[in-house]
Amino acid sequence: MDNRVRALLRRELAGYFQSPVAYVVGVVFLGASAALFFSTFFLVQRLEMRQFFSLLPLLLALLMPALAMRLIAEERRRGTWEVLATLPVGTARIVAAKFGALWLTGAALLVPTLFFALSLRLLGPLDPGPVAGGYLGALLLAGAYGAVGLWASAVARTETVALVTGTVVTLVLSLVEFFLVLLPGGLVPVVQYLATTHHFSGFTRGVIDSRSLVYFFSLTLFFLVLAHHRLVQER
């Protein structure tokens, strides 16, 4: 990793964990995850994580934009973006460092949810394939939604607008599959392919589909390129 990217990455990670943002968002995310997981577990009473993973896209759709809203918008508000933009590091490195810190923070907040899998494992045999696949999919999903949130922070003038913009886009990507029955037949395959839940569901069954990998990497790269383009226009 480039030394300049590493230095920027440490700066961004420190910004998360030296402020209450990550802790507040993390507590809300973990509290909601635990409440939803255990409530559905006691209703379904099956030793599987499928119910948790089915709710995860919606939770991440709210979590990642909340973590990302400060990345650029707060820099503008505090007047530090102009200083950062003039450093000889390049916009691409700034975007990479901010995205890396965001993704690592999102991944760190997923770690405590492994307690759910451990709890089920103590109760009986648990198929490791869907669990491992589900967490791999969750990391890819967090990356894609994080890129959306970073783009929203780049185009918005305030953190509130960044949060709303990013959340609207991630929720559309998460929920659009539920409205396929309302669409003309010819549009269904196209819209279904754009739905994050369609690709994520395969991971939760323990199936690693190369088309879904391409989808998540492409979606992440698309919004990172948009964010980079927007920031280049400002420099």
Image (tube, rainbow, N blue to C red):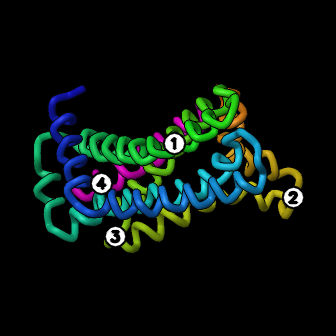
Q: Nearer the viewer, mark 4 or mark 1?
A: 1
Residue 180 found in image quarter? bottom right
Disc sitting over residue 231 in the figure: 4
Q: Nearer the viewer, residue 224 or 133?
A: 133
Q: Nearer the viewer, residue 146 or 187?
A: 146
Disc 2 designates what residue? 184
Of all residues shown, which one is farthest toward the front? Answer: 123
N-terminal of the two: label 1 or label 3?
1
Q: Could you tell me residue 218's position as x and y percent?
A: 54, 37
N-terminal of the two: label 3 or label 4?
3
Q: Secondary structure at mark 2?
A: loop
Q: Measuring 59% from the left and 30% from the top, which residue is drawn there?
A: 132
Q: Measuring 75% from the left and 48% from the top, which residue is drawn there?
A: 192
Q: CA distance from mark 1 to mark 3?
A: 32 Å
Disc 4 crowd, CA 10 A, few/some/many (<14, 14-19, 20+):
some
Disc 3 crowd, CA 10 A, few/some/many (<14, 14-19, 20+):
many
**Identity, as a three-letter code, of the amino acid under mark 4:** Leu
Q: Nearer the viewer, mark 1 or mark 3?
A: 1
Of all residues shown, which one is farthest toward the right? Answer: 185
Disc 1 designates what residue? 115
N-terminal of the two: label 2 or label 1?
1
